[in-house]
Amino acid sequence: MKIKKAVIPAAGFGTRFLPATKAQPKEMFPIVDKPALQYIVEEVVDSGIEEILVIIGRNKETIENHFDRSIELELELERRGELELLEDIQRISHMAKIHYIRQSQPLGLGHAIYCAREFVGDEAFAVLLPDDIIYSSRPCIAQMIHIYDKYGGSVLGVKEMEDDILCKYGNLQGEIIEDRVYRVDGLIEKPKIGENYSNISVLGRYIITPAIFHILEDLEPGIDGEIQLTDGLDRLAQIEDVYAYRFEGIRYDIGDKFGFLEANVEFALRDEEIRHRFIKYLDRVVKNYR
Ligand code: UTP
């Protein structure tokens, strides 16, 4: 069945990026000139998905305003004759059908996804964590839909990670069944050093079957006292086939200060308008700090 809906949870506290996240969601931090969440919505739309649910928490207004029309701004750009910019701005509000739901308390990613059950209904759906931006020639979630179409079960986006950061993510136990594709036997969230199953981490992209909602309904809080999606997916893998796919692309964790800077520098270096000036600037400034 075609994947028609995507869920984007954006209701976390963003504590790794305080104080910047005190009054604004990290999902709205710009990567060069676009908020992180716009990259995610574009990935969804470019993958052929038509409807999006954003799970919002406190400070939701900036998110809603960004994807809504801004009539005053449009009139002003028209008056100034800035027609290209006007088209860009209008495109944002027409990109997709975006719905919002509030997660009243950030009880964990599993709980955030559970809030999407009515929107999702009885179909498999995509989940994209907006603090994972993935730069790739083919949208990451489209790559995963391809695997879902082939195998028919849930698909988790994974990457091989260095030993010292395995403890930050969900960790995969499974066997490889074709190049880049694994059958999942089990998962553990944020394993302690030495307790990891493998060096494969689950990152912020998922295709999930609706059976997850029955599991999340009465899932106990796990590590960090949060209702963990990874724990729910671990149970899902015990009752139906779950696959993992080592996606192609460069992934940036923009919920982390270093990852956010990496994303900004690399996206700026890819931007034709500023790259030459920016390279000269970097050459000059880096020497001063060596
Ligand atoms: P993270 O754990 O990376 O986000 O959750 P966080 O909790 O905001 O960040 P830190 O660790 O405190 O810095 C991954 C994604 O899930 C969302 C977050 O907004 C983020 O996009 N999330 C997390 C929710 O929507 N609700 C939650 O209860 C938890």
Image (spheres, rainbow, N blue to C red):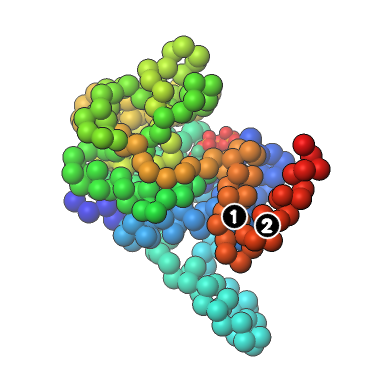
Residue 103 seen by the camera: no
Query: Which quadrant of the structure image shows residue 238?
Result: top left
The numbered mark, 2 or 1, whose residue comes first in the sequence reads 1
The amino acid on which the numbered mark 2 sits, given as a three-letter code, is: Phe
Circle number at residue 269: 1
Residue 101 placement (x, y as % from top left): 46, 51
Circle number at residue 223: none
Q: Nearer the viewer, residue 168 or 113?
A: 168
Residue assigned mark 2: 278
The residue drawn where x is 65% and y is 39% is: 257
Query: Which quadrant of the structure image shows residue 151?
Result: top left
Residue 271 placement (x, y as % from top left): 57, 61
Tag 2–tag 1 contact (CB < 8 Å): yes
Instruction: For ligand 1, tell me if the residue under mark 1 lies within 8 Å.
Output: no
Residue furthest to the right: 288
In the image, 211: left or right of 287?
Answer: left
Report the number of numbered marks.
2
Which structural element holds mark 1? helix
What is the crowding at mark 2: few (fewer than 14 residues within 10 Å), some, or many (at least 20)?
A: some
